[in-house]
Amino acid sequence: SQQGEEDPQALSIQEGENATMNCSYKTSINNLQWYRQNSGRGLVHLILIRSNEREKHSGRLRVTLDTSKKSSSLLITASRAADTASYFCATDANDYKLSFGAGTTVTVRA
Amino acid sequence: EAEVAQSPRYKITEKSQAVAFWCDPISGHATLYWYRQILGQGPELLVQFQDESVVDDSQLPKDRFSAERLKGVDSTLKIQPAELGDSAMYLCASSPRQSKETQYFGPGTRLLVL
């Protein structure tokens, strides 16, 4: 079963715009992670945020976590064509097993 | 940069046939995971190994699926017999002993069962 749910399912933006996607989950977590998957490829780890953190940055990525609402958001600033991919949130309930959502498909138009 | 290797990349088989997938994790990574990803969905964990031992195979359909990691390095996932519903991407991931939180994924094996 999948713990996380991403919203929206799909997102289309113009190059240079920001992209925001959200993730909601159901049970307590130790950390939440975001992964990117290019079409037909494996997943690439983007960023990890722990349950005692509220915000984290990595390059053009900004992740927030609200444990009271059991939700997280991923912001990609100044998007590029290379950001076209599916983005998944994954929760770790302190057992090193990840539970993934269904993902948000992002298309960046040139 | 070290990567997780998987083979084959693509496999087409007929139902009731046997298939096998191979994964070679990043050198030194103690934990190895097999996931199944159905088109349009996120990956779902099938089995987790710590060295050569199975940590969790609760989601592995054991009547037809088997997984092994005999020497604690590379791993094989087998399906026998394959069913139409097994068509999916099979992903292998590994994580280092000292930092188990982050998983490194291979390119996957896309299986099509006809």
Image (cartoon, rainbow, N blue to C red):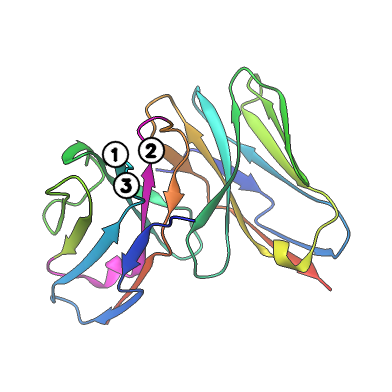
According to the picture, the residue beneath numbered tag 1 turns out to be: B30
B108 to B68, vertically: above or below: below
Q: Which residue is at a point 56% across and 69% down the rendered structure image?
A: A39
- SS under mark 3: strand
Q: Nearer the viewer, residue B69 or A102?
A: B69
**N-term mark: 3 or 2:** 3
- SS under mark 1: loop
Q: Which residue is at a point 13% across and 75% down the rendered structure image?
A: B16
Q: Image check: A84 left or right of A39?
A: right
Q: What chain does mark 2 sit on? A: B
The residue range painted magenta reads: B80-98
Callouts 1 and 2 on one subunit: yes
Q: Which residue is at a point 13% across and 69% down the rendered structure image?
A: B81
Q: Specify the amino acid type for callout 1.
A: Ala
Instruction: Tell me residue A44's x, y (percent).
Output: 54, 53
According to the picture, the residue beneath numbered tag 2 turns out to be: B96
Q: Specify the amino acid type for callout 2.
A: Pro
A9 to A96, vertically: above or below: below
Neighbour class for label 3 at 10 Å: few (<14), some, many (≥20)? many
Distance between mark 3 and mark 2 Cα atoms: 12 Å
Do the numbered discs 1 and 2 sit on residues whose CB atoms are within 8 Å? yes
